Amino acid sequence: MPTSRENIEKWSWKYWLLRHYQDFLFRLYFKTETVGLEKLPKNTTLIFAPNHQNALMDALGTLVMFNNWQPVFLARADIFKKPAVNRILTFLKIMPVYRIRDGYENLSLNDEIFKKTMDVLHNKNGLVILPEGSHAGFKRLRQLKKGIARIAFQAEDAANGELNIHIVPVGLEYSNYVRFHSKFLIRVGEPFEIKKYLDLYHQNKALAYNALIEELEQGIKKEIINIEDETNYTSYLTLTDLFSERFIKQRKLPKTQNQKFLIDKKIVDSLDGLKQSDNQAFASIMQHAEEYNGLLQQNGICSKAAPLSGEKLLWLPIQGLILLLTLPLFLYGGINNLIPIVVPYKLSLKFKDVQFHSSVRHVVALVLLPLVYIIQTTIFGLITKDGWLTLAYLGSLPLGAAIVYHWRYQFYRFYRMIRVARFMRKKPEKCRRVNELFTDLFEKTKTLIAE
């Protein structure tokens, strides 16, 4: 892999092959949905600005917006320190941006980066900048760095306004940052041109930077769940988790990720409004949400199980029998996919920052899957000396991995319902309290978003 960034803006067939393979695995890891692409103007220079919550997965998630584009990303320079990582990131079309904390003597290296940024923008293949500068695993937009404004204005000014650069706010929303097969929503916001700020930029750069950043901040906030109340953050999440999917099912609304997002956002905005208009009512909801979440957590009850009902337990014997009968399939898939499943998981645990876990698992699996499948299939073929049987074995490997995932998922559902049954039998009063709180919170939230 080249370390030179000389042709980073050029189309690469090697990159094309890798990115389609990575897109396929990314969509397996995260069930991905994209909305808002119709907002993008044609024949313009675009700088995409997503929020940053989940390390490398944010960049890879942005990549799957289009089938064939090869955008260039800007990232903080400290992740490029190791030569091997530097080569990989350069091949992935990611360039470093140096900050004062990276050493004052390194700031001059940004001159070269800016020149390549100009090449990227002139080439119109898309530039992606994560304006928060670093990731954080919570649903809140943090203060944006001014680097994106400097780059955009310098490039547009150097081109005498002919690039027609548009900044595109992008919202990235995860149902879970780490869990395999979680949901991932990409929301493309309303692009805005920066030429309208050029006169201000020539008069006062600082004011122009602030104006652009403010518009971008408002644009991104429209496309994400933005919970600014740090004190009641968990209670906000409890209410969205309790309400939205059940409301969608009740009203027979489209079961899309974007539909859930719209309801979640309405809940957050309504709670923010209630806090201002009726703080006592807001405090009551927060208190009940905290109590409800606490009861579930203390007793190991999954939020999806509520409201707790004996009717949901009637199918437990049949579910247990199905799991027992399909156990051999699980064992076959698990044994033959042991390395690509266990190794990425174990390596991810070496990172204290949980936001790196999905990135490590995804990248390691990208490398291990084809290698392990080729080696195992070769060994199988040498042993059996049967071409058709070997081909069947190769086909069974990804099928086995899918069976492992679904069996494991159903097993944990079964186990969680066993815990619910035990909870209902041993602690009926707390069970009733959980259901009372659920009903109260659901009805109050329904009333709140209807106002």
Image (spheres, grey):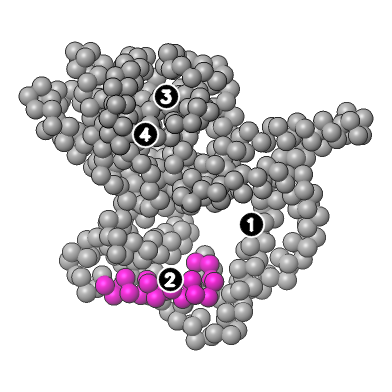
Residue named by callout 2: 293
Q: Amino acid at mark 4?
A: Arg
How far is the residue under mark 3 from the one under mark 1? 36 Å
Q: Relative to residue 400, is residue 23 drawn left or right?
A: left
Structural distance between the alpha carbons of marks 3 and 4:
17 Å
Tell me the kind of residue under disc 2.
Asn
The residue under the point 40% across, 64% down is 238
Mark 1 highlights which residue?
409
Residue 375 percent across, percent down from the top left: 77, 32
| Residue 67 in sight here | no
Q: Residues within 10 Å of mark 3 (few under 14, many from 20)?
A: many
Look at discs 3 and 4 and give the one toward the viewer. 4
Q: Which residue is mark 4?
A: 76
Q: Is residue 440 left or right of residue 356?
A: left
| Secondary structure under the numbered disc 2 in the rendered image | helix
Please name the residue shown 68% across and 70% down the image.
315
Label 3 sits on residue: 71
Give x and y (percent) for residue 87. 51, 24
**Which portion, as a residue range, is magenta?**
283-303
The residue located at (53%, 75%) in the rendering is: 299
Q: Give the Cα separation between the discs numbered 2 and 1.
A: 23 Å
Q: At label 1, which amino acid type do we have?
A: Tyr
The mark that comes first in sequence, 3 or 2, is 3
Which secondary structure lies at badge 1? helix
Report the Cα–Cα distance between label 4 and label 2.
37 Å
